Image (spheres, rainbow, N blue to C red):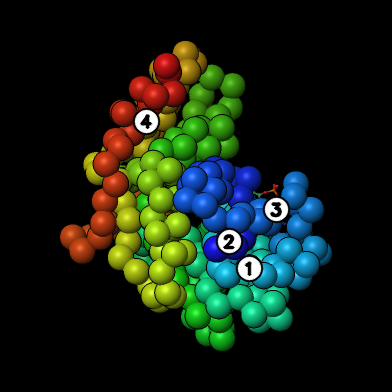
């Protein structure tokens, strides 16, 4: 089958491309470095020719609700429009566990993305996952000031990006299924501890300060809204296991 991966050069996207190729898919990468701008739509129509399914794992790095909403709205509308034109029969998007309990900041864009997909005409699947193990590194790089890392008080249930990619390709190979069971990691972790562990693993020094973020968004981070419920599926690789593979 011919599978397009929007954001196929990103953190989870590289795994999605790898898993799809291992399973014999013909893969088309949709990203700026591959000549496709999903926000302007340039290069998109040609790239979707003959495609059976689009796996959307594109993202933008922002904590602004306005910027996130503008990005996910433009990308989703452009991709869905191009899918209709090209006759693509399945739109599969990756979302995040708990976004509707705190539809603010970056999550505002994810809620908008899901709403646009649900109200569109292209048959769809949405998988919500928890934070990837890599999130500890992403948040540390955004929230470090010299030797000080200021990390939100947050309970996470991190999962291997590779396991999310495997689930996405399982879903891409099946008919559109709507909202499917959430996917989370095997264990709950404190984000500050994850960042400390990551810093140790890469030999970095410094202080990690855990701070509660005010408002509904910060409360959702702290109160367990972003971890999975009992009816979710769970991956097997713990954050500790993942860190061990990084320090080898
Ligand atoms: N990070 C997490 O912990 C996590 C957890 C659960 C779900 N998710 C969801 O998973 C998805 C992927 O997240 P990620 O962390 O893997 O993202 P990421 O590492 O930031 O990668 C973003 C991807 O989007 C592409 N992109 C950005 N702007 C683009 C544009 N204008 N046109 C075309 N491509 C563009 C980038 O490629 P170029 O720069 O080459 O354009 C890159 O391939 C997102 O929907 C996110 O909400 C993330």
Q: Which residue has dot 3 on it?
A: 31
Number of the label disc, if any, that sits on residue 3: 2
Q: CA distance from mark 4 to mark 2?
A: 28 Å
Which is nearer the N-term, disc 1 or disc 3?
Answer: 3
Marks 3 & 4, CB-CB < 8 Å contact: no
Q: Residue at x 80, y 63 (%)?
A: 43
Number of the label disc, if any, that sits on residue 158: none
| Residue 5 appears in view | no
Mark 1 packing: few (<14 Cα in 10 Å), some, or many (20+)? Answer: many
Which is nearer the N-term, disc 4 or disc 1?
Answer: 1
Q: CA distance from mark 4 to mark 1?
A: 33 Å
Where disc 3 sits, the SS reads: loop
Residue 38 lies left or right of residue 62; in this view the side is: right
Q: Which residue has dot 4 on it?
A: 242
Where residue 52 sits in the image (x, y, percent)? Answer: 58, 70
Furthest-left residue in view?
Answer: 230
| Residue 156 appears in view | yes
Number of the label disc, if any, that sits on residue 51: 1
Badge nearest the viewer, 4 or 2: 2
Q: Tell me: is circle 3 under 8 Å from ligand 1.
A: yes
Badge nearest the viewer, 2 or 3: 2
């Amino acid at each position: 089958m011919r599978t397009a991966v929007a954001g196929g050069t990103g953190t989870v996207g590289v795994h999605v491309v790898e898993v799809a190729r291992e399973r014999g898919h013909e893969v088309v990468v949709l990203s700026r470095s591959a000549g496709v701008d999903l926000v302007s739509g340039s290069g998109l129509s040609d790239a979707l020719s003959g495609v059976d399914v689009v796996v959307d794992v594109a993202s933008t790095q922002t904590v602004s609700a306005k910027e996130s909403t503008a990005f996910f709205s433009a990308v989703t509308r452009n991709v869905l429009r191009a899918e209709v034109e090209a006759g693509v029969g399945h739109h599969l998007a990756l979302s995040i566990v708990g976004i509707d309990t705190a539809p603010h900041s970056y999550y505002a864009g994810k809620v908008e993305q899901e709403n646009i997909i649900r109200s569109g005409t292209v048959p769809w699947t949405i998988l919500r996952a928890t934070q990837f193990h890599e999130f500890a590194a992403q948040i540390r790089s955004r929230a470090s000031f010299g030797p000080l890392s200021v990390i939100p008080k947050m309970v996470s249930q991190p999962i291997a990006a590779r396991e999310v990619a495997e689930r996405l390709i399982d879903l891409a190979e099946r008919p559109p299924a709507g909202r499917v069971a959430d996917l989370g990691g095997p264990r709950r972790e404190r984000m500050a501890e994850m960042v400390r562990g990551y810093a140790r693993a890469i030999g970095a020094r410094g202080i990690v300060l855990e701070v509660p973020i005010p408002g509904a968004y910060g409360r959702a981070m702290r109160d367990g809204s972003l971890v999975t419920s009992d009816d979710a599926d769970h991956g097997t690789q713990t954050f500790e296991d993942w860190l061990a593979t990084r320090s080898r």
